[in-house]
Structure formats: C-alpha cells, structure tokens
Image: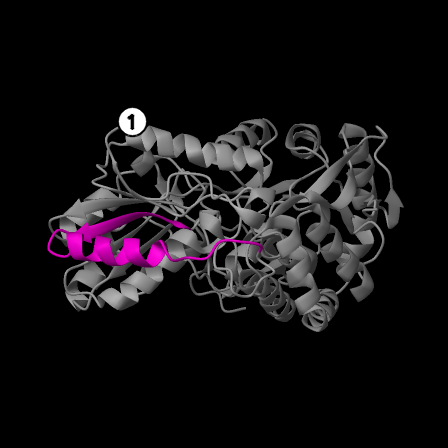
C-alpha cells in the first residue's frame, strides 16, 4: 500500500483540516500509486503562515553564515542520497533518470552556492556629503515567503527559491505542485534533518486554487515566488498588487534556436534534440521553435527527422530510454490538441503527432516526438507554449530575419544561435529579446550561480539564481550614523553652509 504523507506545519506533521487526500501516480505506469497526500485548504495555509510568523523573529536574528551552514548541510545530505532522490523523482514525474540526477545536482549546486552567500550578503558604504557622518546599507530579511513551485523540476526549482530565502532569514510556506508532492516532501525532510528550526519551513499540499491562492491572498505573507504559467502569474500579480506584496514571477516561454548556414550542423542537431525533447519538452526553456537558414533548411530537416524518429520512449528508470511520458493525461491531451491545430492551420507534419502505444507504453501518458515543418510565424504552434515534445520549424533568409522571427512572440525566456560567424553571434546577443541567449548550445542548461529569468510576458523582471535571488529575498536598509553632535541638514544647501568649516 502506498505511503500516506502529511503537511508539515510548525515542526509537526498534520493531516489536512478537510480530512481529504489525493493520490500521486507514476505517469509512466499510471497503476502505480507513489503516495497519498493531504488535500489542504485555506485553514491549513492559515496555520502554516501563523507558524512561519512565530518562527520569523528568532530565525531572522540567527547569523546569516549560520543559516548558510544549515543549507550547506542539506546539500551534503542530497549528495549522499542523490541516486535515491533521482529515481524517486523519475517515478513521480516521468523524466529519465539521467535528467533527474541532473535535477538533484542542480539542487546540490544551489545549496552550496546559497550557503556561501551567507558570508557575502554585502551592503555598500559610501562617503557622506556631511562631516562626521557615516553612511552604509545592509541587507535584512523580508518576512514570510510564499513559495509555489511547478512539477517539471520538482527538486531544482524549489531549491532555487527555498535555499536563498532561508539564508536571507525569511521563513517559508511552501506549496509544491500536486503532480510532484513526494519530491517536495523529501526536500523538506532533508532540510529538517539539516537543522532548520520548527516553523521556519512549512509545507502545505493541495491544489492551486485552494492552497496556492490562499497563500497569495494571505495578508501576513510578504513575498511570493512563483514559477508556472503566464495566465496564473498574471492572476497572482493582480491579487498581490492590492497590498503591494513583493512578487517574483517565472512564467512561460516559446524558445527558439536559430541555425545558420555556416553552423556546425551535427552540433546543432545534438542541441536541438536535447533542447526540444529532453524532459519530453516539458521545460519552460525547451526548444519549441527551430529557425533554419533557407540554404540548409531541407538538409537539416531530414537529419533532424531521422534522428528524432529513433529516440527511445519508455519508463525513465530504464537507462536506455531517452524520452519519458507527459506528466499526466491532461497534459498529453493538451499536447495532442496543439498537434491537431498545427495540421488544421497548414503546417506539415514530419514525424509524430500521435500517442505512443504498444507494450509498456500503454501504461502511461507517452506522446511521440513531433516535428512540424513549413511553419509560419502567425501559426498557433509558433506562438503559444505547448509544453510537450512538439517542435515547429520555420525558415529564415538571414540572421536579421531569423532574429525578427524569434522575437515575434509574447515570451522572452531562452534563445540559442548556432553560427561560426562572430559578427552574427554578437548581433544576436544584442538584438534577441530574451533573458538568456546561448551561442552554439541549446536553449536549456542554466547554471545556478547565474541569473535566470526572462523578459516580456515570461516574467516581471526579477531573476532567480545568482545574486538576483538574494536581491528578491532581502530588503535593502540604508543607515546614516551622525556623530557630529549637532543637527546637520542634508540637501539643505550643504555645500554653501560647510564651506571653510573643517571642524
């Protein structure tokens, strides 16, 4: 029988106040129940926020380097348990174990980076315009942080948010995706084992409407870090704006890879296969569009179709499998609906476009890697995020034309360009409207110490990863120390008044 999990609030395991539960199943074998989880509501969120508020005072006064030590210990535990964590994650969300190992490693890297930032939470010092006066700025915690994470990177993305929040001195109410609650519960267990005090980190399982929005709407939650769809992000932004709550939104993408006629085509081919079909295309940075120079269009399309048609689908715990399932039935249906739209709008289906069936594939939500050719920029499959193994191929006359096509969506997360022409490469870096640009590499592969995020409707300007995460999870406080023993009036004609005064 599958294990029943609970919420973790104020250092104690608790059932949902509703008494209801939901099942978490393996998308590669839907008959396998991975775990049973509490179906929570606003009452559970209220309890978690109250616990986080009570823990905040003591935690915020704990020295940042010591908070970092706890996060570093969590990273050490993750290293020791890496293989078990990866295999558990593959059972829960389906992507191949090679990728889930990378997901865990990203969490480990984030732990070590965030821990070290506990000793580098620098402010600035600057000279005062007045004599006998000292000026500086310091970083201070914000308060209770609401963390709402997606299912596609169930270890890495929560660590992007939780680790810097903890080191910054914030306390947390964490709502993981309902498709991947077990990995999230395990992460919380690791942090508790590492020494996070009671109430500092609380996890509440349940749906977005019942739990996620209750966190967003709660008046004592001072900041929200959300990764998910643009539609939900807009709703969160609207609600949070009523109280001027600080919000970081990491939203959708429609990422494109440009391959020019002078590119290393074999390298570009490897990159597009990894970018488009890794994680079954279920990444916000997935390569959803391929823009080919007209001179190599037909040749490269043939190369791509031949290689993509040989990708092995199956249960991700099999080391030979290259593409796992969609995360659930609804996601597979969504992917297929876009395939039907593509055909209806006149795109040419090259391979795929249907459910993958036969043998063990019938147990899960598998979809064949799909490629559409002769796609035009106005087509739905060239504009909307599909979040599945579907690639739209477009044709360009030049680098300028390719950049114009790439920029022609409401999103701006990741981009990639394959070329040996250094002038074209730097033109692309300058002119592409995206938060990330890769040269001679696919659209996926972010590193934890670098800023991660997008422009346009991909986000609201904040960055995860690197120092940007600490910019979000801390406040800047400016401090003036006047030791002149008299009233000094800054900005009241100070230069004229102080002229000649050397005391």
The residue that appears at 42% across and 41% down in the rendered structure is 458
The x, y position of residue 41, in whole percent, is 76, 29
The x, y position of residue 69, in whole percent, is 73, 70
Q: Is residue 68 left or right of residue 461?
A: right
The x, y position of residue 398, in whole percent, is 12, 52
Q: Is residue 429 visible?
A: yes
Q: Which residue is mark 1?
A: 344
The residue that appears at 29% across and 67% down in the rendered structure is 267
Local crowd size for mark 1, using a 10 Å CA cut-off: few (<14), some (14–19), many (≥20): few
In this rendering, is residue 500 above or below 45?
A: below
The x, y position of residue 275, in whole percent, is 39, 56
In this rendering, is residue 177 above or below 296?
A: above
Residue 235 appears in which quarter of the rendering?
A: top right
Question: 88 or 188, which lies in front?
Answer: 88
The residue that appears at 78% across and 41% down in the rendered structure is 36
Task: Report the residue that reaches farthest toward the front.
Answer: 359
Q: Is residue 49 magenta?
A: no
Question: 184 or 34, which lies in front?
Answer: 34
Residue 138 appears in which quarter of the rendering?
A: bottom right
Residues shaded magenta: 286-315
Question: 390 or 105, which lies in front?
Answer: 390
The residue that appears at 54% across and 68% down in the rendered structure is 503
Q: Is residue 480 left or right of residue 48?
A: left
């Amino acid at each position: 029988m599958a294990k029943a999990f609970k919420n973790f609030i104020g250092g104690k395991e608790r059932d949902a106040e509703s008494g209801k539960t939901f099942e978490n199943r393996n998308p590669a074998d839907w008959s396998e129940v991975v775990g049973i989880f509490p179906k929570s509501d606003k009452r559970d969120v209220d309890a978690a926020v109250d616990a986080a508020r009570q823990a905040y005072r003591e935690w915020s006064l704990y020295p940042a380097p010591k908070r970092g030590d706890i996060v570093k210990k969590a990273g050490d535990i993750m290293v020791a348990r890496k293989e078990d964590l990866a295999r558990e994650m593959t059972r829960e969300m389906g992507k191949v174990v090679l990728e889930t190992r990378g997901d865990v490693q990203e969490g480990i890297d984030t732990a070590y980076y965030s821990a070290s930032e506990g000793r580098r939470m620098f402010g600035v010092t600057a000279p005062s315009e007045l004599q006998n006066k000292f000026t500086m700025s310091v970083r201070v915690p914000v308060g209770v942080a609401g963390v709402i994470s997606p299912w596609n990177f169930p270890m890495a993305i929560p660590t992007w948010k939780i680790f810097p929040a903890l080191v910054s001195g914030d306390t947390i109410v964490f709502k993981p995706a309902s498709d991947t609650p077990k990995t999230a519960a395990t992460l919380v267990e690791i942090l508790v084992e590492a020494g996070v005090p009671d109430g500092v980190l609380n996890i509440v399982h349940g749906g977005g409407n019942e739990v996620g929005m209750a966190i967003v709407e709660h008046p004592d939650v001072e900041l929200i870090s959300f990764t998910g769809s643009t539609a939900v992000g807009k709703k969160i932004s609207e609600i949070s704006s009523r109280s001027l709550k600080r919000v970081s939104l990491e939203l959708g993408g429609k990422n494109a890879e440009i391959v020019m006629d002078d590119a290393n085509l074999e390298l570009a081919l490897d990159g597009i296969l990894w970018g488009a079909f890794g994680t079954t295309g279920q990444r916000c940075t997935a390569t959803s569009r391929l823009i080919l120079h007209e001179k190599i269009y037909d040749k490269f399309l043939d190369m791509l179709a031949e290689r993509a048609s040989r990708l092995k689908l199956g249960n991700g715990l099999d080391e030979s499998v290259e593409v796992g399932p969609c995360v659930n039935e609804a996601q597979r249906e969504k992917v297929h609906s876009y395939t039907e739209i593509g055909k209806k709008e006149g795109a040419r289906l090259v391979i795929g476009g249907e459910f993958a069936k036969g043998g063990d594939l019938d147990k899960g939500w598998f979809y064949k890697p799909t490629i559409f050719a002769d796609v035009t920029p106005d087509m739905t499959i060239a504009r909307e995020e599909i979040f599945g193994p579907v690639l739209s191929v477009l044709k360009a006359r030049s680098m300028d034309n390719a950049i114009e096509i790439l920029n022609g969506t409401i999103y701006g997360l990741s981009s990639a360009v394959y070329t040996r022409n250094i002038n074209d490469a730097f033109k692309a870096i300058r002119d592409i409207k995206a938060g990330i640009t890769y040269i001679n590499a696919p659209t996926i592969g972010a590193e934890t110490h670098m800023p991660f995020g997008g422009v346009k409707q991909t986000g609201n300007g904040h960055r995860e990863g690197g120092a940007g995460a600490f910019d979000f999870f801390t406040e800047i406080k400016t401090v003036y120390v006047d030791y002149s023993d008299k009233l000094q009036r800054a900005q009241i004609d100070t230069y004229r008044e102080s002229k000649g005064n050397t005391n």
